[in-house]
């Protein structure tokens, strides 16, 4: 049963959300929702540490400081700066590899987690506060997503930037227990800063847009707590957020939280491969074939990929030559799986992308866009077919769900494998394991700063 | 003659602007353009000082600090903070009274001046750099404004927030002499942060949106200078700025600067009255009648206002009871002129708005919306008619241009009158005059910090 926010019992959307966020209590959260949040938190911090030395992140850092001093840490080296700066830099790092989790047409954890960790450190909040804040942010994001008339992508918006800033404000408002009035103003102040364009994809500005959402959301909650007000109709106003960004809005946007938890319905898709999510099922199909038939590149004559039209548009690079192009290439994804039997950060290097084996297979790959394979977001299944030099044709299975998706969430062991490969990039293995365990269990009554300090993260430069 | 940015000689818009901004030289600026900038600068700093103690400004300040330290000053008390914070707070102060100048469907000086002053102080720039930066910002704003398919207001956007952030980035890029590549990235990073909703009008978030544009523009130029890149097609890309915010864009957007200087064509409308610009001609009509016939409130039976439809929509409050409502009320504007023979900050007080004389006249005022009085932005003229208790009807003249408009720019004496009344709110009269003279002449080769320090501004708390 969907609830409309426009029936006679409820105030309009902004005030409704403000009240719902403010009254969210940890004791009301389903255990499964908390498990999803912890999985997203672990995954996000892993990819954030892996991304922390990317040029986009390092350049923004160097514009912000030194000198450094402040309330929250940058990952993983523990440099302390203002919470806003930490949210921006850590948010960029979390998204820069495009290896972070996916839901609601965007990247919830890369926006919410950096904002929440920075504010938690600034005010000495605990694990339980972060979980409550995350759920508030996720449910807010989902409410806006459902209330939008159509996908933001189609109008040029980067949804993680646009929805993300309002969701991050909701998250920080819940973390800090703002009143309903303050929370409503925080949403309006966030709507005043929502931004991010698809045109910037493929540049450093893409991850900046994600970090900016985290920063601006955190700042919005602080401003509201400081008595700065905003329209209490900022989202649903005829000259407000939904009309301006989504062109129109439907009144059947759904409620917030109990009983129709969006986080239980939509979950998080955890990425197992550091490339565009639209290529993940093709990778799995290719890995299955590679392993079952012990394929080697010279034995392959040609490759045929069956996927949906929208997916194919997202995978815009057909003949990639750079790492960034490779991240958005169905051809590279499958070639990497067939050549290396794995698609990880090790494969996302220029030397591998340009290697003879990979380029050879890329050149021999065609896409079959089956219009009957459904409409957005994804087709019902993807399939890889390989024609061998000896004439045989190997038909891969119909892959419906990628590993790590909400339908097959990663186990603790699988989460650790990814964490080890991502956080382990910059941390000694002992600290990596300690950090993973502390985050996976996330003691609800322990302060976030203490928890992070005790993992040895602080001194691991 | 308009130039298109899409003919074969020119690159697409973003790169075209980046190159044009980077090659702007002070020696190429027409003297009249420099005079317009100086007039805007003086006016902006006056209203900024007047607005500096408004609750919206003080609350944002208190979220940002203390502790205070940094590169740029807050007006007028000289507290030093980061340039980004100074741009935000001073930008809010410049707009919070809605007494700042108007052009290009927005408020150029309230965005550009705070960004430029903060960055000028941070890097020790001179008067000439600020003038060059202002012209770069204005021409960029005008280029986007002309390239938009329709008014941003109609789609819910606050144009000063949306155009303003890109213009402020252009201004700071020119101030700091970024390369064409860096400047182009600065525009893309600004486009990644453009925001601001009409829904927030009437709340503290409105002036925040203006301050945010100043801050985000300044930050964009810094990021680009630090090597952070963005799409070099961010403005004209099919999923870029113009399509996302303006819905579509025309290719005949006009050039940038020489020979068709937008700043000479569009100028600045300096506000003489601290209310919505749509009411200014009605105020002048009422003042003429009040003076010519020595009208007193009891002698007035009823008032009829003739104005355009769009203007009337902007003046949304018909029966104002608060100062904020009064700022957007044709009825209050005319009543204040008839009662006080003046409409200044002294009249924008709750006691005056609620006074018997003013409320009496407001109740007796009707609007005649003449559909033949043209389309947006304004009707060809406004008119006030007063019916007296003795039966006589006084017909005011057709007022085409308000005092201070680009068609009748204020003289030095008129500028001083406004400056004295606005900056004089918080400064001793000696400092006020010193500051006015220093800004009016704006020594091009003197550092901005020195210039401001020497006016006694720093110690006038």
Image (spheres, coloured by chain):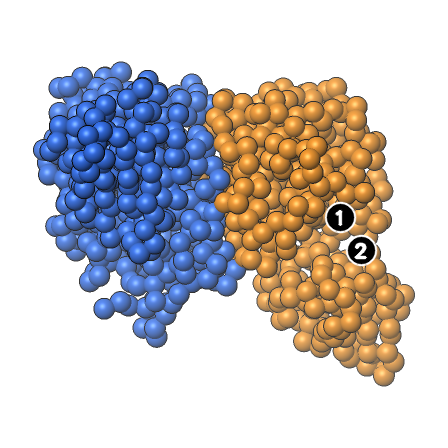
Chain colours: A orange, B blue
Query: Which structural element holds mark 2?
Result: loop
Q: Residue at x 73, y 54 (%)?
A: A273
Where does the image place residue A317, in percent across and percent down from the top left? 62, 67
> Is residue B313 shown above or below B295?
below
Where does the image place residue A416, in percent across and percent down from the top left? 79, 41
Q: Residue A402 shows which numbered tag?
A: 2
> Is residue B366 shown above or below B326?
below
Q: Is residue A376 left or right of residue B241?
A: right
Q: Is residue B21 left or right of residue A385?
A: left
> Is residue A392 shown above or below A174?
below
Q: Residue at x 85, y 82 (%)?
A: A390
Q: Residue at x 24, y 53 (%)?
A: B380
Q: Residues within 10 Å of mark 1 (few under 14, many from 20)?
A: many
Q: Residues within 10 Å of mark 2 (few under 14, many from 20)?
A: many
Q: Quadrant of the C terminus of chain A?
A: top right
Q: Residue at x 39, y 44 (%)?
A: B313
Q: Nearer the viewer, residue A5 or A67?
A: A5
Chain that bears disc 1: A
Where does the image place residue B207, in percent across and percent down from the top left? 39, 34
> Is residue B236 shown above or below A406?
below
Q: Residue A301 shows which numbered tag?
A: none
Is disc 2 on the same chain as disc 1?
yes
Chain that bears disc 2: A
Residue picked out by circle 1:
A269
Visible in this render: residue B242? Answer: yes
- How far, Cα to Cα, is label 1 from label 2? 9 Å
Q: Are marks 1 and 2 in contact (CB under 8 Å)?
A: yes
């Amino acid at each position: 049963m969907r609830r409309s926010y426009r029936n006679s019992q409820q105030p309009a959307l902004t005030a409704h959300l403000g009240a719902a966020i403010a009254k969210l209590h940890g004791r009301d959260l389903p255990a499964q929702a908390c498990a999803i949040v912890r999985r997203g938190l672990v995954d996000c911090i892993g990819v954030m540490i892996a991304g922390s030395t990317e040029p986009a992140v390092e350049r923004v850092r160097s514009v912000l400081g030194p000198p450094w001093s402040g309330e929250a840490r940058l990952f993983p080296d523990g440099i302390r700066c203002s919470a806003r700066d930490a949210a921006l830099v850590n948010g960029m790092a979390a998204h820069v590899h495009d290896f972070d989790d996916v839901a609601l047409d965007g990247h919830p954890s890369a926006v919410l987690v950096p904002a929440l960790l920075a504010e938690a450190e600034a005010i000495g909040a605990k694990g339980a506060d972060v979980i409550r804040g995350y759920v508030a942010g996720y449910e807010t994001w989902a409410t806006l997503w459902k209330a939008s008339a159509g996908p933001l992508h189609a109008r040029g918006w980067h949804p993680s930037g646009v929805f993300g800033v309002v969701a991050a404000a909701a998250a920080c408002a819940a973390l800090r227990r703002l009143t309903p009035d303050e929370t409503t103003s925080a949403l309006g102040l966030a709507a005043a800063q929502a931004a991010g364009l698809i045109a910037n994809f493929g540049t450093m500005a893409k991850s900046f847009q994600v970090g900016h959402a985290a920063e601006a959301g955190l700042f919005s909650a602080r401003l509201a707590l400081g008595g700065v007000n905003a329209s209490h109709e900022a989202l649903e106003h005829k000259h407000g957020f939904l009309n301006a960004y989504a062109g129109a809005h439907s009144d059947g946007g759904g409620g917030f939280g109990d009983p129709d938890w969006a986080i239980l319905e939509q979950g998080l898709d955890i990425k197992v491969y550091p490339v565009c999510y639209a290529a993940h099922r093709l990778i799995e199909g290719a890995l299955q074939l590679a392993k079952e038939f012990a394929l080697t590149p010279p034995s392959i004559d040609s490759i045929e990929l069956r996927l949906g039209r929208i997916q194919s548009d997202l995978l815009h690079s057909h003949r990639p030559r750079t790492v960034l192009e490779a991240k958005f290439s169905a051809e590279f994804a499958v070639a990497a799986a067939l050549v290396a039997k794995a698609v990880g950060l090790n494969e996302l290097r220029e030397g591998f992308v340009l290697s003879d084996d990979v380029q050879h297979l890329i050149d021999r790959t065609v896409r079959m866009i089956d219009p009957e394979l459904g409409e957005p977001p994804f087709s019902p299944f993807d399939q890889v077919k390989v024609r061998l030099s000896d004439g045989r044709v190997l038909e891969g299975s119909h892959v419906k769900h990628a590993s790590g998706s909400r339908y097959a969430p990663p186990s603790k062991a699988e989460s650790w494998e990814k964490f080890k490969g991502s956080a382990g990039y910059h941390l000694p293995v002992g600290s990596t394991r300690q950090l993973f365990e502390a985050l996976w269990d996330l003691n609800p009554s322990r302060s976030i700063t203490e928890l992070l300090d005790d993992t040895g993260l602080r001194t691991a430069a």
